[in-house]
Structure formats: structure tokens, C-alpha cells
Amino acid sequence: MDQTLTILGLESSCDDTAAAVVRVGADGATVLSSVVHGQTALHQDFGGVVPEIAARAHAEKLDSSVAGAMCEAEVGFGDLDAVAVTAGPGLIGGVLSGVMCAKGIAAGTGLPLIGVNHLAGHALTPRLTDGATYPYLMLLVSGGHCQFLIVRGPEDFSRLGGTIDDAPGEAFDKVARLLGLPQPGGPAVEREAAQGDAKRFKLPRPLLDRPQCDMSFSGLKTSVLRIRDALVVEKGGLTRQDRADLCAGFQASVVDVLAEKTRRAMRLYMDEQPTKPVIAVAGGVAANKAIRGALETVSTDFGAAFLAPPLWLCTDNAAMIAYAGAERFALGHRDGMDLMARPRWPLDQNSPAMLGSGKKGAKA
């Protein structure tokens, strides 16, 4: 990037209220500040994120998050070039809270407004952290999304495949609830799996019999449910070891599916003959060590570089939104006060919807 840009980013698509300031120039990107207010305590009694509670919490925390991020970065509004905000996809109440806050800042300061696709924020994280060059293969794997993308530019994404039902993060959360583990489910299941025997229970590897890169995790979750119920009937309940073994088997199945589907996606990506092939992973599930290890093995087999963000950039954050906004800004994009909050916003506009479509457009 020829010019140096300092961007304020806002993120509120699910249950993390975040603000960050990122500076981008010819030498790369620097995160000057990153503030994230999680909502785990607000939702833990409900077994998942409650949209109305999340939206109210965002509205209460956004302005203080912005103030904290700017204070930490030691910048004022006059030092900024633009304000970037997640405009979708996500829980509409939370997205709307962020968009309205960003509009208020833009209107009050005269700063340009840039709407950012939340998924693009994740997909461009390897450029923020490692300066990855286009094109690279991205596995975006989170609580609500799972897809393979060839990333050719800040607005040029080709989807090679994705989940046809539950995303892995959603499956981790549901399995955690089935086994009486706390939310968020991913870390809880991973901790239990470390103490378990992954070979004890026979769990499926869905869609490995099909040649494409598409995935399915709903049936795997149902298999865990059936095994749990059978154990309860047989023993009158689950032992701690039963739970650990189920978690280990479930996690191993997810790892095997992601690894094999990544191999298939890599073959398609390599057909473009990139001179320096790169496979990157982003999203909350990218924090799982077993998944990272399997993907790193795949990259080694293909002679590709493997990029994974630091753990604090795996989950939702505003630094990735600020960076994605900087890339859009550099291309000349600006949004007006008619910027809309979008519950659905697929990155690849040319591929058919994987999870169905409605009046508001494709889900993913």
C-alpha cells in the first residue's frame, strides 16, 4: 500500500463488542490498539447467544470501546483517515448497533465511512499479520461459517466449498451442551478431548465419500447424541471418562474432515500455479490446536507456507475490520449514510448459496 492509513474499526456482529485502531503503510500493518468486550457471562445461563441481549450489550459498550481503543492508540479523530465497521453478516441487532455508531462518528467528524464484510475481515487477517500475497487459500472456520476460499484481492473471493449445515464452531457448541460442558463449547470440548481416547467410539467422517470440498457436521453432532443416550441407558449416566472419550472422538472426526477437505481444496488452488503457495486459517475454531496441527501437516505435504493468526485475532475483533477497511479505502471505496446492516452477505457473489436463500439474500 503506497499511502499510510490510520483506520478506526468497529465490530459487533455476534457477542463481542470491539474497537481497534490499525495503521497500514508500505511496510505493512500495525495494530495500535485493540479493545474487546466479551459477553460470555451474559449468555452462559442460556446455552448460547441471545440476540436481544447481545444487541443491548453492544449498544452499551460501543462508545466506551471506541474511546478505549483511541486512548490506547494515542490518537484523536483528527489522526484518522476513516472509520470502518462490520456491516454484516451477523445478528442484525448487533450489526445495526455498530453501523449506527460508525455513522455517528462519521457524521460528527467528517471521516469517510467504510462498510466491511465480517467474513472479509477474517479472510484478510493473513495480510494484516503476515503480509500474505495474493492469491492464497483460506479456510475460514468459525462458529457460524466454514468455507474454503481462494483470496485473490480484498474483494475477490472464490469459494471452493463449505458446510452445508452446521459450522464446526456451532457443532462444538452443541456437543458441549449435550455433554453438560460450559459455553463457549470449543475450548471446553478441546480441554476434555485432551484427556480422552479418540478411538473408543466410532464416529462418522461426513461427506468424505464425495469428491467435492463441501462439509457437513450436523450428523456428527447427532451421532454424539445417540452414543450419549445409549451410555445413559446402559449406565444410568456418563462418567467423566465417557465424556472425555466422546469429546476426543468428536474432535478427531472434525480434524479428519477438515484435513481431507483441505487437501482437496489445495489441489484446486494449486491449479492456479501460485509461485509461493500459502494456506491460511482464520476464525474462532482456528484456535483449536489439533485443527491447526492437522492443517500445518497438509501445508507441509504440499510445500506451502502455513499461516495462522495469533489466538487473539482468531476470535471476533475490530483490528481485522480496520485492516479490511483500509484495503477497501485504498481501492477508493466509500459508503454513505445509507449504509445498511446486513444479516446475510456472502463473500463469493457468483457461487450459489450453500445454506439456502430468502428475501434478504444468500446466507453464505
Image (spheres, rainbow, N blue to C red):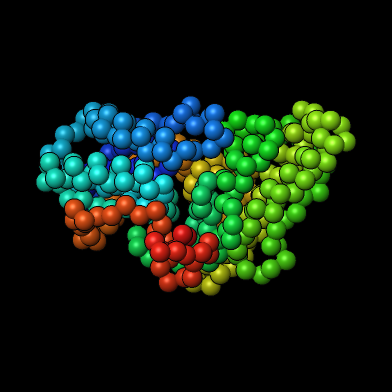
Query: Which residue is depicted at the point 37% across and 32% down?
Result: 57
Query: Which residue is depicted at the point 64% across and 36% down?
Result: 177
Give 94 or 156, whichever is nearer the viewer. 94
Q: Is residue 297 above or below residue 94?
A: below
Q: Is residue 259 left or right of residue 148?
A: right
Q: Is residue 82 above or below residue 134?
A: above
Query: Which residue is depicted at the point 53% across and 46% down?
Result: 143
Give the total of numbered labels. 0
Q: How far across and down, in percent of the image, does residue 26 sit?
A: 26, 51
Give 55 or 127, whichever is nearer the viewer. 55
Res. 174 visible in picture? yes
Q: In this view, does 44 lie to the left or right of 340?
A: right
Give 280 or 235, whichever is nearer the viewer. 235
Query: Which residue is depicted at the point 51% across and 64% down?
Result: 356
Q: How far across and down, in percent of the image, does residue 337 sit?
A: 18, 53
Classify the position of the N terminus by image quarter.
bottom left
Res. 73 visible in picture? no
Q: How far across and down, in percent of the image, does residue 59 sit?
A: 31, 35
Q: How far across and down, in percent of the image, does residue 40 sit?
A: 48, 30
Q: In this view, does 314 lie to the left or right of 229?
A: left
Residue 238 appears in which quarter of the rendering? top right
